[in-house]
Amino acid sequence: MALTETDLRRLARLARIRVEDAEVGTLVTQLSGILGLIDQLQAVDTHGIEPLSHALDLEQRLRPDEVTEVDRREQFQAVAPQVEAGLYLVPKVIE
Amino acid sequence: MDWEVVIGLETHAQLATRSKIFSGAATAFGATPNAQACAVDLALPGVLPVMNRTAVEYAIRFGLAAEGVIAKRSIFARKNYFYPDLPKGYQISQYEIPVVSGGQIVVELEGLEIPVRLTRAHLEEDAGKSLHEDFHGLSGIDLNRAGTPLLEIVSEPDMRSAAEAVAYARALHRLVTWIGICDGNMQEGSFRCDANVSVRPKGQQAYGTRCEIKNLNSFRFMEKAIEFEIRRQIGLIESGGNVVQETRLYDPDRDETRSMRSKEDAQDYRYFPDPDLLPLCIDVAWIERVRNALPELPDAMRRRFVSDFGLSSYDASVLTASFDQAQYFQALMHFVQGEAKLCANWVSGELSAALHRDGLEIRHSRITPQQLGGLLRRIQDGTLSGKMAREIFDALWSDGGEADTLIESKGLKQISDVSTLEKIVEALMAAHPGQVAEYRAGKEKVFGFFVGHAMKACGGRANPAQLNAILKNRLAGK
Amino acid sequence: MNLATTSLKQLAGALRKRQVSSRELAQAYLERIARLDPMLGAFITTDHECTLQQADAADSRIASGTAGPLTGIPVAHKDIFCTQGWLTTCGSKMLSNFVSPYDAHVIEQFKAAGALILGKTNMDEFAMGSSNETSFYGTVKNPWDLTRVPGGSSGGSAAAVAARLAPAATATDTGGSIRQPAALCGISGIKPTYGLVSRYGMIAYASSLDQGGVVAPSAEDLGIVLNTMVGFDARDSTSIQRPSEDYTALLEQPLHGLRIGLPKEFFSGGVSADVERAIEAALQEYERLGATRVDISLPNTALSVPVYYVLAPAEASSNLSRFDGVRFGWRAPQYDDLADMYERSRAQGFGSEVKRRILTGTYVLSRGYYDAYYLQAQRVRRLIVNDFKNAFTQCDVIMGPSTPTVAFGFGEKTGDPVQMYLSDIFTISVNLAGLPGLSIPAGFGQGGLPVGLQLIGDYFSEAHLLNLAHRYQQATDWHSRIPALASA
């Protein structure tokens, strides 16, 4: 199915990706092409077929409730864009 | 017009595990910012979640205690949205198949038992915290709380007043602390409630438009917030307006709820099964192990206190208000057989008062059940009057020790010995023939005069009942 | 010693016999990289000091007699594996400043074995691509023809090994990212059964499909490296716990009675004549080795591409949400508010292919479309798995071309994403099923460019697949052919 410009802008906002007006046209065309490809699936009869999340049918392993991690804040925050007093700084969060 | 209020609660109970739900980082409250945020909690590129067994076990424990159904196979899903306190850009939660379905919480309100049905309880991870105090116009993000295990307990919209909602929340709070899966500390956010509130004309079937109120971090605020929201909605409708479905935040300072714009945009969470986690499978053997390890639950214990100890249902519910208090009471009963009422009065009376005065939890009481038992036995055998007992209690509270030794040292033994009392009475009568004559002439109130003097004569330690009996006989000239 | 013609196994022997030291080996490879890589762009990062330190440590370990098979061997790593103290970019501007504070399980395994980190190899951005044209660090050239693509997403690893800039390299395969570049670069590459190699520290693209593996000149070398790379890891919930296995143990077994399944869908149309010819010759070679052909069918093969392009972007759109400019990675220099910071940082940090897949994934998961796309794709995924289960009742191994054509030219398919996606038609279904897959050199096609033969085995049949490949490589010498550039 074809994608509208409105759809694209909604997706871009959901995905938090800024889309410049100049890009919109190309993106709509390319995504519509991709949707054309995946729309082939609509024709397949999957009646009574269970969805498959993992190829291997395994169950979740559980770990014991033990504290195994130490404080590595220094190393972790060495790669952070902006920190102060051990906190990650971001533009004001409005509530 | 008459309005009916409809309330459902969503409660987030932090599970009292040592480590986080998907990482080995500590969950202790109040650590320095981000010191307990490990690579997994920070969602560094390449890290993966691994499930904490105890968190699952606690969910099972709750499910059984609330008489819900434990899913043999449940799925973890990703709830996708961007927020700075959500490091992965998604929250790992349960969507289509929760670990617990159904169940109920029986709420007591003004002597009535109201069952509140549960929709579900599911496991998920907590988010971090955004600190809004000013960093030159920026917010600071602390991810220590990120990944703390939560059990989200969702009720059916079964409550019809703020009071019922609070009673439900209290009952739920008692249950999760009772079975030891949550520390219940509301100031620290270990037990948080959101309320879905709507109103509809009495008799109408369809629900009204609801608002979700967040940030109800105390039972008092919950009641006030819901009351306000009910007034707001009714006012809105009666003045011709409509309620808009939205999330509202309670502001305790202004005692009002206000709309949360930030949460409104893009409410398309794009849930899908988390490919990093496999189906959570819980076998019957595990469920049974947990069931057998469950403590006696509050309602059962309350009923037992009534049937076995002959306590009033009021006393029984007071005593089972918390697991620790109920345990204290039962321990006390070992030391003072057959005096349930006496024990109940002292636990909910003197002891509670003293604990409250010193701001102590009962598990940190300065007087052990054994000590209190020693004291109550002396009331039981008539050695102590209530007044004396309170004096000993205070001494035990402040200095410790044993009731009996204190009774000795303070010479606080009650005089119940007939001959001693008779001697005192005879001496009195001999000293006051006039009053004796007046009494015998029918001036009954002189009786008090003799009681007073007799008590004075023995430092107030006379057993009142016995003293009265002897006086009556003697004055009657028998 | 001529590195261009010495196998990893021979290098290990030379180290053991002290004919060469690990330091000398490291220096020689680093010298080759410095000399030849500017033409290829296969490496994003090298760190001579660090590599040589590791070499010295390896030499003393060899001296002390505690060396293992890989001790002292330099190995290149795809830049998708987090490597403590090393820039780990995943081929993206988003991580162009990310020095990893921790090691992936795979890196830990190689360190423990005493292997050296020779460098971090170039790749399609976040492993999204089939031509290595989406990397922020520039395209990688195919050593056989510098005007052509090396394949992707592990193009850097494949080109590095093809040019003998490394005796072996790690790689990852989500839809063919090991087998396709191995085929286009004329080397061997294996994608093990899903769950054998830990994904911990391997930057996620599509979690239910991603699998780490190896590229090397020969199957024998693949087996030696796989022995170190495979291993259970409690930090990956999908890591498989099973007794450790020697992947070189079955190499020499004879092939008599081997039943090779040939899916008609892999041979009907779509495949260029030169590739078809090379594959046919390879199959005849296998017959000489005692194998027989069985015609089979994988009826849903064509659907594997649409299924993949629903599931992989869906998982990716969520996996890549953590790149938000808050805790690490690229943050836009200017922005108005929080939302703007997110949108600009991600718009600047991600390249166009990554954005396309994030948007596609966002679409298929969004309200109203989830059932029609995501759930439907998962159902068809089961049909595809069933096709393979069915096939393995009729044959021991499935063979066919790894790619429909030999290496294509730069820019040939970048204009039309769908054309690019379709070039993975023969490799994708293997990831959807979680099966092990291998690609080995099987001669040359148009323009003297390598053709790859794909071997697909049943779950956990890696040792067997390597055996089939090894016997073929004993009978042929395609795997020891090197591009002119490499002998320079």
Image: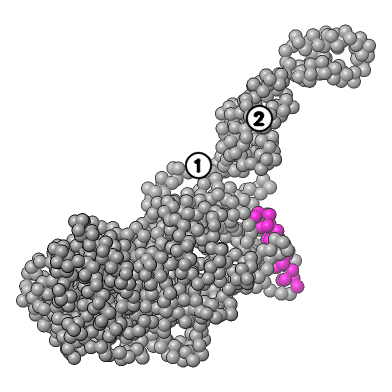
Q: Mark 2 is on which residue type? A: Asp
Check if mark 2 and mark 1 are on a common chain. yes
Residue topped by disc 1: B295
Q: Is residue B225 magenta?
A: yes
Residue B428 tag number: none
Q: Position of residue C438 (x, y in %)?
A: 21, 73
The quarter of the picture where the N terminus of chain A appears is bottom left
Determine the residue positioned at 92% across, 13% down. B435
Mark 1: which secondary structure?
loop
Query: Nearest the camera: B291 or C347?
Result: C347
Report whether B105 appears left or right of B236. Answer: left
C-alpha span from label 2 to label 1? 34 Å
Query: Nearest the camera: C276 or B409?
Result: B409
Mark 2: which secondary structure?
helix
Indicate how the structure is coloured in the image. one colour
Magenta span main SS: helix
Residue topped by disc 2: B399
Q: Position of residue B17 (x, y in %)?
A: 48, 51
Report whether A82 appears left or right of C389. Answer: right
The residues colored magenta run B218-239
Determine the residue positioned at 52% across, 77% down. C342
Residue C393, visible in the rendered structure = no
Q: Quadrant of residue C43?
A: bottom left
Q: Give the mark, 2 or 1, whose residue is nearer the N terminus.
A: 1
Q: Is residue B101 above or below residue B43?
A: above
- Mark 2 against mark 1, which lies toward the viewer? 2
